[in-house]
Amino acid sequence: MARLVPSSLRTRLALTFGIGTSLVLLVALSLLYVALDRQLDAAVDADLTGRADDLLAGILARDPGAVRGDPMAQLYAADGTPVASATALGGRVLLPPDQVRAVGPEPVRIVLLLTVRPGETPERVRLLARPVGRDGEILAVGQPLSTVEGAGDRQLIVLAVATPVLIAALCVLGWLLVRAALRPVDRLTREAAAISTLDSDRRLPAVAGDDEIARLAATLDGMLARLAVAFARERAFVDDAGHELRTPIAIMRGEIDLALQAVDDPEEVRRSLSAAQRQAARLGRLAEDMLLLARERAGALGVLRAPVDLTDLAHAEARALGPVTDLTIEVHGDPVITDADADRMRQVLANLAANSAAAGARTARVTVGTDGTDVRIEWADDGSGFPPDLLDRAFERFVRGDPARTAPTGAGLGLSIVRAVVTAHDGTAELRNGPPLGGAVVTVRLPAT
């Protein structure tokens, strides 16, 4: 069955159009034939009624030649005996006595098979029989149907010849219309097939108008633009990641080479191996950060939600992070309990502390509270703040501030990880400069339990 259905959309549309229009045309022509046939029948009935009225007026006026001068008429007595007959009938009787007696007060229309002319084959005749209104007499007026039926047959022949021609013309017209309508789709298909990942700036041809195909072309073109931006970001990520990985790897190789050259000097070997160990730890952190961001991009960054007192967690992290980052961390706020991943929230606070320390801050303040239906964690420091040109993109990967004002050890992934973790909690993160300590301010909002 599937093989009988054409694979081409153009063919399917043209075939559907042809079948649909053919059915509509056949129904319309059939209705036209029926309507014309009824009009012909109505014309015969109108002619019979008019002739009967004229003959009735003549009969009531005692005109004996009224019936004899009609092409096909007879006047019957109440018992069915012909009283007057049209000369053209040549003595033939239109209605037998039993049918004459069956005529009531209302006119009767019947069709009989009669021999109109001597020697000819019988033909169908329509008769109108009606009472005259005196002594029970009945008037019958007839009309042969050969002319009407011949006109109907000719009409049927004309329709039988014209219908296939009209159907063929409509099918060709439908094919042309479908081909013209789908021509832009063919152009878009060929152009889209020719675009590769290397053609990041290539776009689809514009389609004139404001119909569905034009909107589809505009939508696909916008999608290509978004994909180009995404590809550019991914390429930048790979380039930045390669740059960040190259530096510690080069340092590790250099330190290992120094250790191999100084095997007779244990102190030099220890210093070289310690430096290599620090770079290995830096590589490990960088790999973990990149893996976390990759999971977040794929929507696979999982969080294990459980009731957490964010204020208590902030106090604990302040005690742990202060000595490591050389920051004085103050925590303010009443206990606030919500469903969150405690380990991920510790990672958020650790990255914010590292960011503040890298900016030269000496004091940081953590304020925990509720903000309507959200839980708010505000991290503020007294450092140099975010450079104005970085405020709009500080959450992007591998974005770092001025090296003269920040430590060169970071990879620029801390705030990206903060936003990734907060987003995984269905929250938001914002940043600004200013009060309460005059430096950077990062505000995290999480849904309240």
Image (spheres, rainbow, N blue to C red):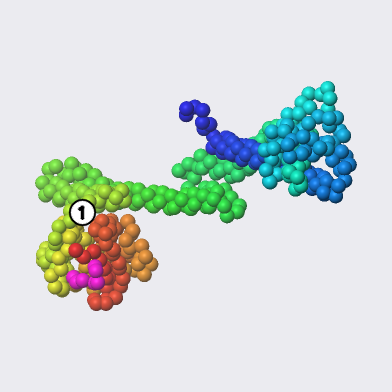
Q: Residue 294 at what x, y percent from top left?
A: 29, 49
Give me the residue at 69% from left, 37% from top. 101
Q: Which residues are magenta?
A: 368-374
Q: Is residue 339 visible?
A: yes
Relative image position of residue 35 (x, y in whole percent)? 68, 42
Residue 21: give x, y in percent of width and height: 62, 39
**Taking 444 as reference, is 238 left or right?**
right
Question: Mark 1: which amino acid?
Answer: Val
Q: Is residue 105 magenta?
A: no
Q: Secondary structure at mark 1?
A: loop
* Residue 165 seen anywhere in this rendered image of the structure: no
Residue 411, percent from left and from top: 28, 56
Q: Which residue is mark 1?
A: 303
At label 1, counting other C-alpha atoms closer than 10 Å, the crowd grade (few under 14, some 14-19, many 20 or more) is some
The residue nearer to you, when weighing 168 against 390, is 168
Q: Please give the name of the residue rendered at 61% of the width and 52% of the height, measured from the top-left corner.
A: 208
Residue at left 28%, top 63%? 428
